Image (cartoon, rainbow, N blue to C red):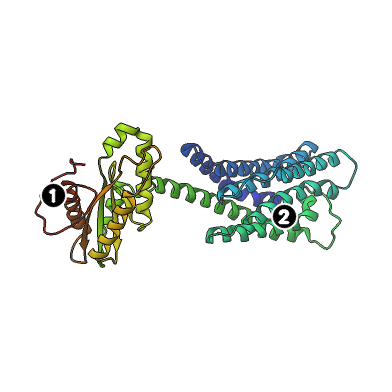
Amino acid sequence: MAIAVDLHLTILGIITALILVSLLVHLSLRRGSALGWMAAALLCVFVELLVLRFGAHSRLGVAAIAMLVPAIYVCAAQAIRRGTGLAFTSHRVVSGTALLTALSLLLLAMPVPPTLQYVPFQLASILVFFDAALALVRKHDRDAFEHALLVLCFLVLVGVILRVPMFPALLDEPTPWGLFDAALFERVFIQCMGVLNTSLALLVVARIVARVILGYRHSSERDGLTELLNRRAFDTLIDKPTASRGAIIMCDIDRFKAINDRFGHQVGDEVIRSFACMLSLQGEHAGRIGGEEFALLLTDTTLEEAAEQAEGLRSAFDSLQHPAIGPNVQVSASFGVAAFDADTSIRAAMRSADIALYSAKQNGRNRVEIAREETVSPSLTLAAA
């Protein structure tokens, strides 16, 4: 079966590249166990191809293939599971896979037909990979990527099942299935399986890398304490041109330093998270732009509607009772509200809202101020907080 082996070797470079990509991303990011599993699966494929090329005619080589083939699908199943957010394969399935593999190794030492020797470890591969595909079927929130992955998984499964009676032909051994044409098996089936397996590996690696990149993008745009947009992401948001009207609310927790000093930073963090949670319910464009300073961007909203939302936030936060603080200490926040339209930049509205917030601080805190004409220099800060 030199032709079949050579067809496999044509994708060896792709497999090697995928191994390197998986390992480099996994090691450099120090996260993403799915990439580690995929690298292990591809490494097993790499070794299997070498054994098929140079050692398939020895008893040791055949024994190595009997262990490598199930290992490929075990590792690939874990990569698929972890890459799609599923749990690892159950111990029962892993144990069944190991027992079937051991049965193949036992049969290899006995004088039985090759077809029977090779069936158990192929059934082990089918068992563990079918279990992963079935888990993916049961996942309710599949995206387009996962639908494509599911289709490829079942195509590979069909190929693996069809390969069972013809597997001895890969090792230049006779098969009892005379209806199958060996030349056709070499030219068509092996090529199709090579394309399917390589496509599956590419899709899984792409999925995993995409998830890792999205995770880091999320981390770069979100505040670690509150999960709101951080200052950089919020600045990027308001600098985008807009053709619609809206409003922006600037918020600041009153006397927050006193809360930290009196009750500790852990309580202070919990107060910030509580306020951030209230803010996030008002819209998706909420950001933490400083220690205890926040901003909320509202689109298709009038100044009056934004002021009502700010008043609702102020009232809800004013009623907050934290167990560590007690009823005798009030937590509150001040708000500044400004509107914008197609002729006014959101950045300018943010400055106006900031000035209104400063006025709220100056006028007693725990209140909402609506931006009017700028009578205060934009250079003023919230030092009064």
Q: Is residue 59 above or below residue 186?
A: above
Tell me what residue is drawn at x 18 percent, y 41 percent: 384
Q: Earlier in the sequence, mark 2 or mark 1?
A: 2
User: Can you identify the residue that label 2 sits on?
Assistant: 160
- Residue 336 point in image, percent of width and height: 21, 54
Q: Is residue 361 above or below residue 339?
A: above
- Residue 19 point in image, percent of width and height: 56, 43
Residue 214 in sight from this viewpoint: yes
- Residue 188 point in image, percent of width and height: 69, 60
Task: Please state which amino acid type lies under the numbered disc 2.
Answer: Val
How far apart are the two marked residues, 2 and 1, measured between alpha carbons? 69 Å
Tell me what residue is drawn at x 80 percent, y 40 percent: 102
Q: Is residue 215 rendered to the left or right of residue 271? A: right
Please state which of the two labelled residues, at mark 2 or mark 1, is closer to the viewer: 1
Residue density around tag 1, few if under 14, some if 14–19, many if 20 or more, within 10 Å: few
Q: Where on the picture, by quarter, is residue 273?
A: top left
Q: Quadrant of the C terminus?
A: top left
Residue 1 in sight from this viewpoint: no
Q: Nearer the viewer, residue 98 or 118?
A: 98
Task: Please state which amino acid type lies under the numbered disc 1.
Answer: Pro
Q: Is residue 134 above or below residue 275?
A: below
Helix, strand or loop at label 1? It is loop
Residue at the right extreme, as displayed: 111
User: Can you identify the residue that label 1 sits on?
Assistant: 378
